[in-house]
Image (spheres, grey):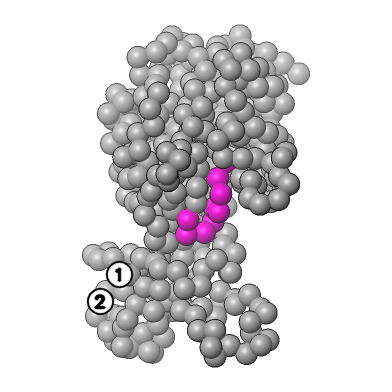
Amino acid sequence: MVIELDLLKELTETNGAPGFENQIRKIMRREIEKAGAPLVYDHMGSVFGEKKGSAESPKIMLAGHMDEVAFMISEITKDGYLRFVPLGGWWDQVILSQRVHVITDKKTYTGVVGSKPPHILTAEERKKVYPMREMFIDIGANDKDQVKEWGIKVGDPIMPICPFEILPDNDTILAKALDNRAGCYLALEVLKQLKDSGHPNTIYCGATVQEEVGLRGAATAPYIMEPDLAIAMDVGIAQDGPGDNSNKAKLGAGPLITFLDSSMVPHVPLRNMVIEIAEKHNIPYQVDVMLGGGTDAGRFHLFKKGIPSLVIGVASRYIHSHVSMVSKSDLENSVKLLAAVVKTVDQKKMDSLIDF
């Protein structure tokens, strides 16, 4: 298979803060419809495409999430500067001096996160991480009235800026919002891969909303389809920077299969089945153990009587900042693995997974 870089570029460069996913949803709808799959929604804004195979059940949900970490205007000062609050998890140190887009109902404005130049910092200030609550965004306005005249108001989302780029190795992709437009891309690509292929189940491929602010879309999305099995497609943390990281996740070493995170101990029989499928099809994979974060699967697995759930995704560098990186080959192998899983899970296999 060939990665559709134009689609991934569009997904990453389009803005979608938590609660403001509408433009991403339009892309998801368009691509799902192109794949010939009926659309299904919840009332939060999550969207999926349904594809029936040779059997109604089991029902398998494959879900990315549309939102990305962002900010929201919380105050406009009398001098025309914007105070802001985070939408999702940010480390204050990565924010200063970055360019941002302020999204209004009618127009997008460019600003910069204000900071003091080093020349006027005291020795004590140089040692500290500047707190977000003291930061502001400069959009070049003269005063509060001019900000109002431009149509900028409290509650408007603020987005990171980072153009999409494929780096010289022709494998490393640099972009904003790969957490989790990578998962959105995987959902769409698996749906397309299976368009003309048989599978012994019914699948729902799509994406949730508001994952970055508390897995909120993941609480409502399962009610659309009442799945028997759920796979969250998300990014994991690449730890392949300088140093001895021989046992850590790396770009280009294959999809990540999560063994543990802060939101879930994955369903062990499902986890083992996915590993068997990867090895059977000679698909490289990596193991992810991370206690510092969670995914939508942490909410999926608690739906009603419980749903066997797992996280399959790709390693990514620098997430929850203005820029991130993933491997094109990891995306390709993730699609192969997810499609192979879908083709494997019939009702008999599903029954064996929950036979405790």
Q: Secondary structure at mark 2?
A: loop
The quadrant where residue 295 appears: top right
Residue drawn at x 56%, y 49% is 317
Residue highlighted by disc 1: 109
Q: Are marks 1 and 2 in contact (CB under 8 Å)?
A: yes
Residue highlighted by disc 2: 150
Question: Residue 299: in sight, yes or no?
Answer: no
Name which residue type carries label 2: Trp
Q: Of circles 1 and 2, which is in front?
A: 1
The circle on residue 64 is none
Residue lying farthest to the right in this orientation: 356
Q: Main secondary structure of the magenta part?
A: loop
Q: Is residue 88 above or below residue 182?
A: below
Q: Which residues are magenta?
A: 315-323
Viewer-closest of 268 and 279: 279
Residue drawn at x 28%, y 36% is 30
Viewer-closest of 131 and 154: 131
Q: Position of residue 300 (x, y in %)?
A: 59, 36
Q: Position of residue 304 (x, y in %)?
A: 61, 33
Viewer-closest of 250 and 210: 250
Question: Residue 330: in sight, yes or no?
Answer: yes
Residue drawn at x 44%, y 32% is 187
Q: Secondary structure at mark 1?
A: strand
The N terminus lies in quadrant: top left
